[in-house]
Image (cartoon, helix red, strand yellow):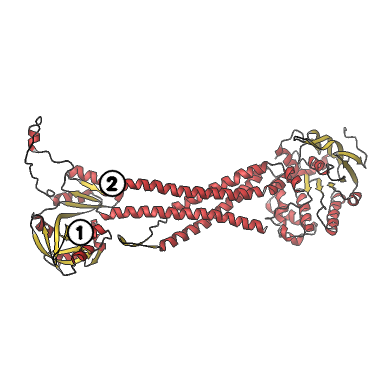
Amino acid sequence: MRFRVRQTLVAVAGVATGVGFSIVMAALMQGSQADFTRQLIDALPHITVSDELRKAPVQPAETAFGAAEIHGLTPEVRRRGINNPMAIMATLETWVPGAVAPATKSQALIRYANRDVGASVQGIDPHREPKVSMLATQMRVGTLASLYRASNAIILGNRLAERIGARLGSNITVQTTDGARITAQVVGLFRSGIRSIDESTAYVLVKTAQILAQQTGLVNEIRVRVADPMAAASVAQRIERETGYKSVAWQEAHEDLLSAFIVRNIIMYTVVGAILMVASFGIYNIISTITHEKTRDIAILKSFGLREATVRRIFVLEALLIGLVGALAGWALGYALTGALGMVEIRNPMIDATRLPLVYSFLHYLVAAAVALASSLVAGYFPARKASRAYPVDIIRGAT
Amino acid sequence: MSVAGTPQDLVDGAPATEPLIVARGVTRILPGIVPVTLVHDIDLAIGGNEFVAITGPSGSGKSSLLYLLGLLDLPTAGEVRIGQRATVRMDEAERASVRLSTLGFVFQFHFLLPEFSALDNVMLPMRALAVMGDDAMRRRATTLLASLGLAEHAHKRPDQLSGGQRQRVAVARALANDPPIILADEPTGSLDSKSSEQVFQILRDLVDRDNKTVVAVTHDLDLAQRMDRRIRLDDGGIVSDDVAMRDISA
C-alpha cells in the first residue's frame, strides 16, 4: 500500500515535471520572441514615409527619346523634401489609425572641445513626437519640451554626449556637409538602450533642422505610429499608393531580421514540442507501469463478473486522475519556475540590464495539460485493455 | 446484462432436488508443447443447499475443477450447467454476468482491492450488477459486514485488517449479490486455526441458515469431514464421491 502511494506520487510528479517544464520553455521562448518583436517595433516609427522614390526617377531626355540610349546626361536635380508635407499629414490623419509626426533629417558633424563626431540630426515636433516614437520615455535628462528653451536647442544620445564630453548646458557646434553651421545648447540627453542609436543621434526642432538643411519648410520624413503594429505593412502600402512617396513599414525595414524570425519560430515550436513529447513518453511510461501492476486486481474484478469495459473504465479513469492531478501540479510548478526565471537579471553591455522576457499565456497551460491528459489516457487505455482481456484464472492460478 | 433471471428465480424455479451445478464429461487440457491435463472426464451434480468439499493431493486438479465450475475457465471438452443453463456457448460477457449474479467466489488470498475500504470492496459486485441504488447498496454491504462481525471495521482499508477479518470481508463480497452458490478455493488456507474456524462457521451457516450451496476446495481432511459431501480427486479424475451420483439425465 505504501509502495503504491509512493508510486502514484512519482507518477504525479512525473506528469507535473513534464507539464511544468514545457510551460516554462514555452513562456521563455515566446517571451523572448515577443520581446524581440517589441524591440523591433519600438526601435523605429511603425511607418516611415520618406522623400525617396522606389525607383530612380526617369530623366526627361529618356522619355523624349525612347529608342535611343543616352549617355552623359546631367540628371535633373529634384528639390529635396516631401511636397506640401502639412497637407499630406492632414490627409493621413483623417484615415490612418494612429498618429503622424513630421521630421527633418540631416547628417552633420557635431563638434565640442575639439572632438568631432558624425551624427544624424533629426528635426522633430516635440508635441507630435511622443505619439509616434518612444523618444519621450527614453529621455534621461530634460524633456522633449526643453527644445523650446533655447533658440538652438539640441538633445543628444547619452553615449554621443559622453564621446564629445558635452554636458547639459554645453554649447556645441553642429555643421553639415553643405557648410551650414549653428551653435546649439544641449538641453537634454536620451538613452534608447540601443548603442548605435545612442552614439550617433541628436534631436533638434524641425525649424532648426531646416536651417541646417538650408531649406525652409523642408520635411523629408513623416513618421507614423499605428494602433496595431501588425497592420503597419498594409497601411504603409496604402500611404505609398496615395502619396507616391516611399513608405516603409517596420516589417520591411527589418525584413532580414524577420526572416531570421521564422527560423526562430521553427526552433521554438520544435523545442517546446520535443519537451512535450519527452514529457508525454514519461507520463505514458509511468502510468502504463502502474496499470500493468494492477493486472492482478483487474483479474480479481473480472472473476466476480465485472465486465471488461467496466474494468477498463476504472483504470482509464485512474490514469486520467493521475494525469489531471499531475497537470495541475505542473501548472503550479510551471508558474513558480516562470516566476523564478523572471527574477534572473541579465547584464549586457549593449543594452540596459534587463530581466528574462517571459510570457504568461493561458494557452501554454492548456496545451501542456491537454498533452499530459492525452498521454495519460493513452497510457491508461492500452495496458488496461490488455489487462482487462486477460483470463482471470491465469492470474489467480499464478497467485495461489 | 443478459441474465435470464435473478439469482432467487434460479433457486425458486428449481426444486431442491434439481441439481444447481452439473458437470458432464468435463476435461481441461492446457495446450502447449507438452499438453497438461488438469482434469478429465468429470461428471458430477451438485444440488441446492449442499455443502461440498473437493479434496485431493496438491496437483490433483481440485482448484482447476472449481474454476471450471465457476466459469472462470473453459473446459476443453464436456459442459458445465449452472442452474439448468448451458454455458458452453456463452461468450465471456455472458459468463461474466452469470458469475456476477449466481456465483460468489472466496479465494485462499482475500484479493481485496487495497485502495478501497471494506465497505467499498463489498459494494464492488453490487455496483457492477447495478440493480440497486447507492443507498441500498451501502445498507446491504453494511448489513453483510455486520452479520460477519465486522460492523466496526467497515471503513477500514484491507491493510488495517487482520488476515481473518480480510477473509471475512472477502466472504461478504462473495455474498454481495446474494448468489445461490458460493465457490471457495482453500478459504482457510492462509489463516490461523482460530480465524480458520470462524470462516468455516460462516460457510456452515450459509448452508444451514441461508440455504446456500457452498463448494469448497480444501486439502484439510478434518475440515472436509465436517462438510456434508466430499468429492475426492486424484490425477485429474474423481476417485470417490461419498454421496451417490444423482441421475443427471433427468
Q: Mark 1 points at which residue?
A: A201
Is B189 situated left or right of A57 in this image? right
User: Residue A368: percent from the left, percent from the top?
Assistant: 49, 51
Going by the picture, which residue comes out furthest to the front?
A114
Is A235 situated left or right of A278 in this image? left
User: Residue B231: percent from the left, percent from the top?
Assistant: 89, 43
Tell me if I can see residue A124 in this picture: no
Residue nearer the viewer, A44 or A69: A69
- Which chain does tag 2 point to? A
Report which quarter residue B119 is drawn in.
bottom right
Tell me if I can see residue B189 in this picture: yes
Q: Mark 2 points at which residue?
A: A255
User: Residue A373: percent from the left, percent from the top?
Assistant: 54, 49
Report which quarter residue A167 is drawn in.
bottom left
User: Residue A27: percent from the left, percent from the top?
Assistant: 42, 55
Q: Residue at x 41, y 49 (%)?
A: A268
- Which chain does tag 1 point to? A
Report which quarter residue B47 is drawn in.
top right
Residue type of the residue flagged with mark 2: Glu
How many residues crowd around disc 1 within 10 Å: few (fewer than 14), some, or many (20 or more)? many
Q: Eyeballing the image, is A15 above or below B90?
A: below
Quadrant in which the C terminus of chain B appears: top right
Q: Residue at x 46, y 47 (%)?
A: A273
How many residues crowd around disc 2 within 10 Å: few (fewer than 14), some, or many (20 or more)? few
Residue nearer the viewer, B132 or A317: A317
Secondary structure at badge 2 equals helix
